[in-house]
Amino acid sequence: MFSGLRVLELQQHLAGALCGRLFAGWGAEVRTIAPRTPGPEPLTAAEALWADAGKRPAMLEDLAAECAAADVIIDGWAPGALAAAGIDTTTLPTRGRRPVVCHITPFGQHGPWQDFQVSEITLYALAGLMNSTGHPDRAPLNARPPLVSISGGLYGFIAIAMALHRRHRDGRGEAIDLSLQEAAMQNIEIILAEYAHHGRVARRNGDRHAMVPWRTYPCRDGEAAIIGGPIRNWMKIAPRFGEAELLTPPLSTAAGRIEHRDRFEALIRPWLASQTREDLFHLGQANGLAWAHVATLPEVLRDPQHAARDFFTPLHAADGSRRVVPGAPWRGRHLRWDAPKPGGITQPPPPPETDGNAEPTSALAGRRVLDFTHDWAGPHAARLLADFGAEVIKIEFPGRLDGMRGAYPERVNGFPRFWQLHRNKQSLTLDLKQPDDRALCHQLVRDTDVVLENGRPGVMARLGMDYDTLRGLKPDIILVSMSAFGATGPYQGYAGYGGTLEAICGAQSLTAYAEGETPFRVREMDVINGIFGASAVMSALLQRDQTGEGEHVDLSENETSVWTLGAILAGLPDTDTQPAALGNRHPHHAPQGCYPCEGDDRWLTLCIRDDAEWARLATKIGPTAQRPAWATVAGRRADHDAIDAVITDWTRSQDTLVLMMDLQSIDLAAGTVMNAADLHASAHLKAREWFLPEGRLTLPGFPFHFRQAGGRLRHGGPDLGADNARYFARHPKGLQAQPDLSPAHLGTAYV
């Protein structure tokens, strides 16, 4: 796909390295240059093994020549570092290349926090993600997978791909400003949108989901993810519990289970405790429920689904040992991951000449997307495409509406989460089981570029929308199928939600306060899978730019979830080792933790990365921290509990935001665990004008910013069937223009 594309990666952090890895994996020539003075957290050996596969190093002395020859520059250096090295990105275009430059930094290229010191935990806290993870009566909990870096790397790939797609059309290069904080905040888009509407600050709830059941429960040999979704299928399995009370109101209804949560859970726990994880996984799926189990990494590596799809691939470490890591994050009929590169570099044709007088257009202007997705991951992918110029038509079946419209027929148009997830889209209601509705849909396909869906394999075929039918209507159509486990393998018909995918992919097994304690959800897998979905769409569009051919992308959300663990898997000494849970600590630095501050549920994260940083912190704290044994990292790691107690005594009476600024002033990686109110009030985000005003509320901003013709908020999520009249008017039979919103028509499953 990227054969002949020259990518220069200015390497400083994992996010930029993962962005480069995606380009290298899909065929680009990627060369890496590290800065003369590495940052405080360079890639670990495992991260480098995982993220640098397929790349070649270049010399810092050749920076100017490498920049001049590059089509894409992934700039992971600190703000201004590239300019300080004598490179003016505005003068780079040479020989018709007109490069795309993507600056990936913790807080963007400008703003009060642009020079803050950070580590993964401080970014997780400052992006608001950490506030949702863990027990409500304990400190917020850091996710073990590096989810901020992964989000940032994926968004970097999407941003660059969008700019390359536009360059193919109009010849323009681009400069992109990607803040890792803003990219990671996409993971809590619903929390941010609902705070803007309701004014309520979401808090950790110990994995007590709004729906019941929807969490992990103890079983005979560990923990299983038991959820009541899809809701319509719950009563198929209720008799298995052997409790007659579960079969009659109130517990036979979703509302009753929510109202009587404790009673319901007391009734289901005994039977669950008698079952194995594996049996519960397959039994739930056999009854149409997206059950799963909390898997360890050795279990993930041995999973028959991954074996059947040949997902894992070997890598050889510098010491000669063999490691096993994820392979292609998505698949296609023509896409080839890590294919051998031909000798030499094939020069791609130069981009077309740019009309300097023409106004730049959005990256996806002129592209139409039919969005058949529901819930969160798929709609997030489609929302990204809509934000950057695509015409996205959300197809809704009135008999079973998207769960993000809520659960009340009288309020289908009144939910902030729907306004956020489906902003900039159109709404068209169709029942594809009806011949006339299907004919209208086929008519739309003839002018469509991408069809995006996240149903189980086979659903689109039953609706007359399989790939062969689609390409018969539009030969270069792209179909991206985002199913839970992929289109092949023993689990191909199984369902999944973010909560169950976190469990079965291994991420949840790593996220606990300490070894042996109950693991917690990380809660970001829905959006991260949506980011993977948008990445897959852009890869197929770029391939079509090169070849003129369409594509059917098979994306397994189970595999993309495992992809987030790539660096951790690369660090395992063998396939039988399960990494210990670290809680809020770091595998190498000390101390690292989350410490209480003044006020209710107010916390500060700290990561001390070397002895000089500890000396500065110890001076701030005073004599209680200035023990000779703690002057070295080995001494601090050995006495971490005592250091945590000293820091806790010191932070407990201080304002977290004031203390953060004080510690950042002496270049320490300190970060407040931000909640939605903090983020809406953030001076840094205000300076970057990140939040977007919309008629009904303020919506979260974009994950990256183009210098010219970037993302734009046109409107919030549409009313159900808002665009029916527009499209039905074109249909020869003139179908009903307004959807029937009566409870009977919407369907009892929705009610």
Image (cartoon, rainbow, N blue to C red):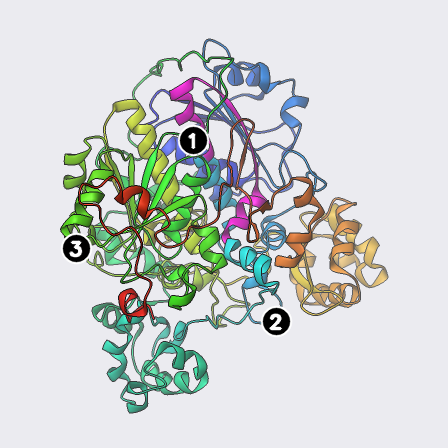
Quarter where residue 642 is shown: bottom right
Q: Cα distance, mark 3 to mark 1?
A: 35 Å
Q: Quadrant of the N terminus?
A: top left
State which tag comes first along the sequence, 2 or 3: 2
Q: Quadrant of the C terminus?
A: bottom left
Residue 483 drawn at (x, y percent): 28, 52
Read off the residue under disc 3: 433
Q: Is residue 136 visible?
A: yes
Residue 409 drawn at (x, y percent): 37, 67
Position above or below: 2 against 127 = above
Q: Cα distance, mark 2 to mark 3?
A: 50 Å
The image's mark for residue 162 is 1
Q: Decide which of 347, 451 is in the foreground and name it.
A: 451
- Type of residue at label 1? Met
- Type of residue at label 3? Lys
Task: Identify the residue shown where x is 45% and y is 49%.
Answer: 571
